Image: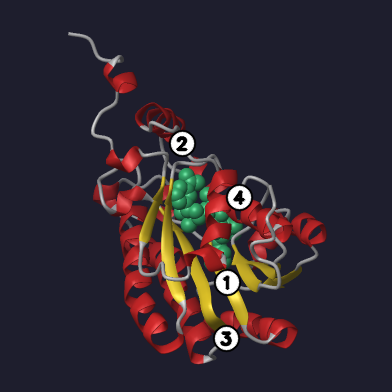
Amino acid sequence: MAHKLLEGKTGIIFGALDELSIAWKVAEKAKEEGANFILTNYALALRMGKINELAEKTGAEVVTADATNMDDINALLDVAEQKYGKIDFVLHSIGMSPNVRKKRAYTDLNYDWLHKTYDISAMSFHKILQALYKRDMMNEWGSVLALSYMAAQRTFSEYNDMAEAKAILESIARSFGYFYGKEKKVRVNTISQSPTPTTAGKGVAGFDKMLNYGEKMSPLGNATADECADYCVMMFSDYTRKVTMQNLFHDGGFSMVGISGDILEGFNG
Ligand code: NAI
């Protein structure tokens, strides 16, 4: 159902690891919609993942960049600037917590790892925005998006320190969105996505149960990675030019439901 919503637009997509990645689906859809872009990930992901397959499929150049490293970000923006001049969209689809990965309990966090969680999953968003802003790299009405999760607002017992990282991420979208909007007419938003079976998603303890729970709670069912990519494309398009500083729930209605009939059925007595 391509509508060429992104015809003539250029951008950067962070975070495509393999075909399950949300960023992978965004890249495929953005291409279908007429966009050209650079794909980027950090060195280990380039070695372990399949980004070159995606690059071939979408005609994208791959640039290695650790999103926590300002020099890497600037080197990436050098390539983008040379290729496109100013750009129209950026997707931050990056998340990692050593505490989650190493199964540390929330009440026993390793603080060095917590710093890493924040740095990779939240501060990287500020670094990318700051580099884009200082270099005046975005066209007017450009759109910068990051992906979040509802644990930023409510407690999800197994989400660990990623909850704080997502709260910071969403706050950065609001704070930077103000300045970017006022000074350069650039939009900054986060999309709060349903649980999605990806490498990062499946790393969360009890992920399959969260997926089932989400499915039973949400009147429309969980939103898939493909559907998330559709929403991202719309947010990059000219149809959402006055949407900024928002955290946009893309969750089949989950965030507004207290309890559903399907969940109630599981309880007796
Ligand atoms: P994924 O594992 O495919 O993507 C995570 C990406 O982060 C990987 O490509 C990884 O290489 C990249 N990354 C990690 N450290 C990096 C670094 N230092 N520099 C650059 N890139 C780095 O998983 P998924 O699910 O597609 O994750 C994308 C985003 O969506 C994340 O922010 C995640 O928290 C968010 N999200 C995921 C949900 C899910 O259930 N899968 C639900 C809601 C949000």
Residue 245 in the image: x percent, y percent?
Answer: 36, 69
Q: Earlier in the sequence, mark 3 or mark 4?
A: 4
Q: CA distance from mark 4 to mark 1?
A: 18 Å
Question: Which residue in the structure is indicated by mark 2?
Answer: 222
Whether residue 190 is visible to the viewer of this picture, yes or no, is yes
Callout 4 amino acid: Ser
Local packing at callout 2 (Cα closer than 10 Å; few below 14, some 14-19, many 20+) is: many
Q: CA distance from mark 3 to mark 4?
A: 26 Å
Task: Name the quadrant of the C terminus.
Answer: top left
**Residue 260 image-quadrant placement:** top left
Callout 3 amino acid: Met
Q: Earlier in the sequence, mark 4 or mark 2?
A: 4
Question: Which residue in the structure is indicated by mark 3?
Answer: 137
Closest to the camera, between mark 3 and mark 4, is: 3
Q: Assign a secondary structure to mark 4.
A: loop
- Mark 4 CB near ligand 1 (8 Å cut): yes
Residue at the spot 39% in from the left edge and 69% down from the top edge: 244
The disc placed on residue 89 is 1
Depth order, front residue of 240/211: 240
Q: Assign a secondary structure to mark 2.
A: loop
Determine whether label 4 and label 1 are within 8 Å by CB. Answer: no
